[in-house]
Image: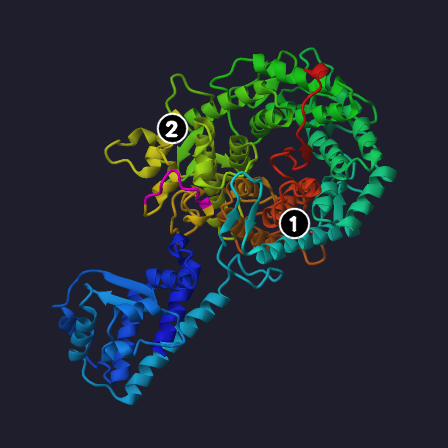
Amino acid sequence: MAAVLAGGSAYYFSVRWMPDPSVARRVGGQSVLLAALRIAGVTVAIVRGLEVLQNAGRFSKARPSAILKGLEPMSLEPLSIDIRTRRNWEDDFTPTPSHERKVRPDRPYVASIHWGGADDADAAWTKYNKAAPQRSELGRRIVLYILIALLVGFGLWEFARPSATSVESAPAETAKPAAAITKSGAATVRNVNDTVWDARAENVAEAFRHAWKGYETHAWGYDELKPITHSHSTWMNVGMTIIDSLDTALVMNEAQIFDKALKWVMEDLKFDYDGDSNVFELTIRVLGGLLSAYQLTNAKHPPLLKRAQELADILLLAFDTPSKLPLESVNFATGKPRAANGGAGPGSTAEITTLSLEFKYLSFLTGNKKYWNAVQEIGKVISKIPKTDGLVPIYVNTDTAEWANREIRLGSRGDSYYEYLGKQYLLTNEEVYLDEYRAAITGIRKHLLGLSNPHQFFFIGELPSGVPTPPNRDLHPKMDHLVCFLPGTLALIATRGKLTATMSERLALDHVDLLDLELAEELGTSCWQMYSQTLTGLAPEIVYWRAQNQQLFNEKTQTLAERELKRHQTGTASPRPTHVSRYLNSSLSITDNIPISDLNPLAAAIRPLKLGGPVEQDFAIHAQDGHNLLRPETIESFFVLYRVTGNPIWRERGWEMFQGFERWCRVEEGGYTSLNNVRVKPPTPRDKMETFFLGETLKYFYLLFASPPSPGDEDDGRRLIDLENYVLNTEAHPFPKFTAPSGFL
C-alpha cells in the first residue's frame, strides 16, 4: 500500500511540478517512472523503507531522532536509482531474500534503489530496522491511514482551490505539454497530443460564437457591444465588429456567421457618418478586414473588394497635405479631413505610419498604384527625419514633417511604427524597410532594455525626454501591454515565418536573427509575467517594473541575466550553441538535430523560475492602470513564437490566459466584457467588448491551439495562416506575401 501511495505521489508531482520535462527521456515505458523517481526520489526511498519494515512486521515506535542516530554510520553518498528491463536485471543479479520481494512478474521494469553506493542499500535497511522496535498491527494501520488521508486531502485541496485553470467550458484533460514532432525545414509543427489542443481550439470557437451571439442580439449593425447593459456604442458607424470578425469566422469555419456578416456588408454598410472618423482605425480594422475576407474566400466575393476601394478613396482625402503625411481623421458626410486634437495636431507617429500594408495590398489587387504611392510617400518623408539609433518620438508635425516632441516609447503612439517596418519587408520584400527595422531594433536594445527585480526579467522601458546624450540608461520602467507585440514581431522577422524548431535550424540563422529570436523569447516570458503575477491571472493595461540599477552591475558578481542583458544591449553574438543550452543541466552538441520542445520547455523561455509568494513581485500596477481591455498583443506573440519554434510552453501559457478570460470576462447572456481592475477578485466589468477581441484576440487563441497548416496544402495554409506565406496586419487581418509590380517601385 505504501508503495502504491509513493508511486502515485511521485507521478503526480512529476506531472504537475517537474521543472525539467527532459528528465522523462523517451525510452518507452520508463519515461514516467524516470520522471517520478527523479523528482520524488527521496520520498520513494523513505516510503519503500517503510514498506520493507511493514513486510517484516517491524514499524518503529522510536522518535525520529533515535532513528537518525541509528543511521549515522551509514554512507552519506547520494541516492542512486538503476532502472533495467526485467530480462537484463535477472541476468545481472542474484536474488537475495530481501530482493526477491521486489520481483513482480506483472512489471516489465525493475528499479534498484541504492543509498550511499552499490552495497549500502541493504545495510541502510538493516540499520534502520535495528533502530526501530516492533510495532503493533494497529500502529501499522494508523501509519497507512495517515498516509492515505494526507494524499487524499492534498488531492481534494488541489482540485478545489481556485485557479485560472478551472473553467467550466474547458476540456477535462490537464496533460503535460506534449513534445512537438517536427520535420526539419517543413513549415509545420505537430503535437502528439493533438486531440487535447483540437478540443481547446473548439473552446475558442465556442467563445467566438458566444461573443457573436451577444453582439448580434444587442448591438447588430453598430460598432461595439456593451454586454452588461445589453446595449451598443457608436464610434464611426460602420458596423466595425461585423467587419473585424469576417476573417475570424472564416478561420474558424463559422460559415453561418460569415454569411450573415457578408450580407450586411453588401447591403447595409455605409460610409456616411457625420463626424471625425479615425483614418488609422478605419484602415487597420475596416479596410484590412474587407481585404483579408476577400482573399481568404479566394476572391469569390467581389463586393468586398469594391467596398474596400470605396473606403480607401475616402481615406485618401486625409493625405492631401503639404508634407504628404495624412491627417488624423476624415468626415464621411462632408469629405473634410482634420488634424488631431480638434485640428491643432500633432499627429501620432504610429497612426501615420501604420497604413502601408493595407494600401499596398489594395494597389496589388486593383492594379491602381495611387494607393501604393500615397503610403510610399509617408515612408520616404519619415525616413528623412533625423532619428537617434533608429528610434522615433511618438508625435510628428504633419505640416512641417518634423518631430513634435522627444518622448520615445513602444507603447501607445509608437508601437506599430516598428511593427510595420518589419512587416512591410515581409509583405513586399522591400529591403529598405528591413534596414530601417534593424536600425530601430538596435536602438531598442541599446536604450530601452531593462532588468526587473527580484527575478530579473527583461522589459522594455520608455524615454520621456528622448535618448539622453550621452546615453546614461535613464530608463523609465513603464511598460504598456501594447508593447507585448514586440516578441512576436522579433520572432517573425528573425525566422521569416519559418519553423526553426531544432538546434541545427536555430544555428543556421545569421547572428542578428538569432539574437532577435533570443530576445523575443526573453520578452515573451516577461509579457507572460504581466499575467501570471496578478491576482486574476489577467494583465493590466500598464505595469511599472521594479527595475534594477544597471549602473551598479558588477562584472565579477554579475548574474546570468545581467550578462545576457549586457550582451543584448551591445549586440554581442550568442555563445554557441545559443542561450538555450545554458539553461539545461547537461551539455548539448551544436550539431544535434534536437527539437527545442524535446528540451526543457522553459529553456527557450529563459530562466525557469519558481515564483510563488505575493503577486506583483517584479512590477507595480498603479490604480488607474489596472484595467484589462481584452487586448491581443501577448497572445499574438505566443502564437508566433509557437509557430516558429515549436515550443509547447507558449501554447500552455496561452491556455492559462484563455481560461482567465473565460473566468472573469464572459457574460452569461452573450459577449465578453473588459474589466476595471485585475487586482481584485472578482474584477468589476467595464461594460465594453472591443472589436479587436473578435478580430484579433480570439483569432490568435484559435490559431495557437489549432493544428498548424499542413505543408503544401494551399487552402489549409490560407485558412490557418501559414506564416511563411502570409503577413497579418496590426489588427490580425492576413494578406498574402507578394512581389510588387515593377511600375510600383
Q: Residue furthest bottom?
A: 137
Q: Earlier in the sequence, mark 1 or mark 2?
A: 2
In the image, which residues are magenta? 587-596
Crowding at dot 1, Cα within 10 Å, few <14 / some 14-19 / many 20+, comes out as many
In this view, 161 is above or below 142: above
In this view, 211 is above or below 358: below
Q: Which mark is residue 673?
A: 1
Q: Secondary structure at mark 2?
A: loop
Q: Position of residue 21 (x, y in %)?
A: 41, 54
Residue type, mark 1 in image = Thr
In this view, 310 is above or below 541: above
Q: Between label 1 and label 2, give the one nearer the viewer.
A: 2
303 sits to left or right of 538:
right
Residue 325 at least partly seen:
no
Q: Which residue is mark 2?
A: 573
Residue type, mark 2 in image = Ala
Quadrant placement of the C terminus:
top right
Residue 433 lies in the magenta-colored region: no
Q: Secondary structure at mark 1?
A: loop
- Towards the viewer: 459 or 445: 445
